[in-house]
Image (cartoon, rainbow, N blue to C red):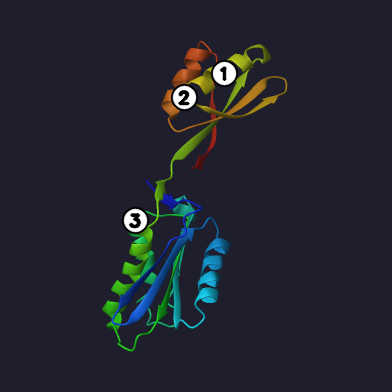
């Protein structure tokens, strides 16, 4: 199950390793603009930092997911990639992380840098509140005008979300649910077997 952060949750955590300061920020990012905005914020708040390394994962669906990372002058693969791996290990999506580093005069080596950057992100994530992302299926259900109100009321009372009712030649209800089997069983019972829900897509929440 993928997780994302509360939009209001923007933790900032500082760690110090051999006198180098690592300031990590994470935030909810529903687009690459959100991610680049976080990076720009870190650059503005810490203009004297030597590096602003980043990683982000955007998209609920694996086949269309965007994953990016950057080392911003650190040796290749020692910052952005470990940060990205940390986000993926926590099953986080729609999230961005940036770590600003002030060099403390002691070289950490490739392994030390990787641990420092991934650890900084882990500390920031642990101070946040990841929330599970549930896959909701969306159906359309035709009903006669005379029974549409009753069907809508029955579905709502059973916990299904009726997001829209369109009245044309027949009423068309758009319904979202997390349990397709429970929904189709409820429709069969409510309509005495006359209802025929049609799946039209899904959404993540």
- How far is disc 1 from disc 2 in space, using C-alphas? 14 Å
Marker disc for residue 109:
none
Marker disc for residue 183:
2
Quarter location, residue 143: top right
Q: Residue at x 54, y 67 (%)?
A: 36
Task: Where is residue 204? Give x, y as percent.
Answer: 49, 43
Lower sequence index among marks 2 and 3 = 3
Marker disc for residue 153:
1
Q: How many neighbours does mark 1 have within 10 angstroms: few (below 14), some (14-19), or many (20 or more)?
A: few
Task: Residue under label 3, please give it.
Answer: 90
Q: In the figure, 204 relative to 137: above or below?
A: below
Residue 128 is at least partly visible in this image:
yes
Residue 66 is at least partly visible in this image:
no
At mark 2, the secondary structure is helix
At mark 1, the secondary structure is helix
- How far is disc 2 from disc 3 in space, using C-alphas? 31 Å
């Amino acid at each position: 199950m993928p997780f994302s952060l509360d939009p209001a949750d923007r933790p900032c955590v500082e760690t110090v390793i051999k006198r180098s300061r690592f300031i990590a920020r994470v935030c909810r990012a529903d687009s690459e603009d959100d991610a680049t905005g976080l990076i720009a914020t870190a650059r503005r708040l810490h203009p004297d930092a030597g590096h602003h390394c980043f990683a982000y994962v955007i998209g609920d669906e694996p086949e269309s997911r965007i994953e990016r990372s950057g080392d911003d002058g650190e040796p290749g693969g020692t910052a952005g990639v470990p940060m990205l791996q940390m986000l993926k290990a926590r099953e986080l999506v729609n999230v961005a992380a940036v770590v600003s580093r002030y060099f403390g005069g002691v070289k950490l080596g490739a392994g030390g840098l990787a641990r420092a950057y991934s650890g900084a992100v882990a500390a920031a994530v642990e101070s946040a509140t990841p929330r599970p992302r549930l896959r909701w299926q969306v159906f359309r259900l035709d009903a006669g005008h005379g029974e549409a109100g009753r069907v809508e009321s029955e579905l709502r009372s059973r916990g299904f979300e009726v997001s829209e009712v369109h009245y044309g030649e027949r009423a068309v209800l758009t319904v979202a649910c997390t349990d397709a089997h429970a929904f189709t069983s409820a429709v069969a019972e409510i309509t005495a077997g006359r209802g025929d829900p049609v799946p039209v897509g899904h959404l993540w929440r």
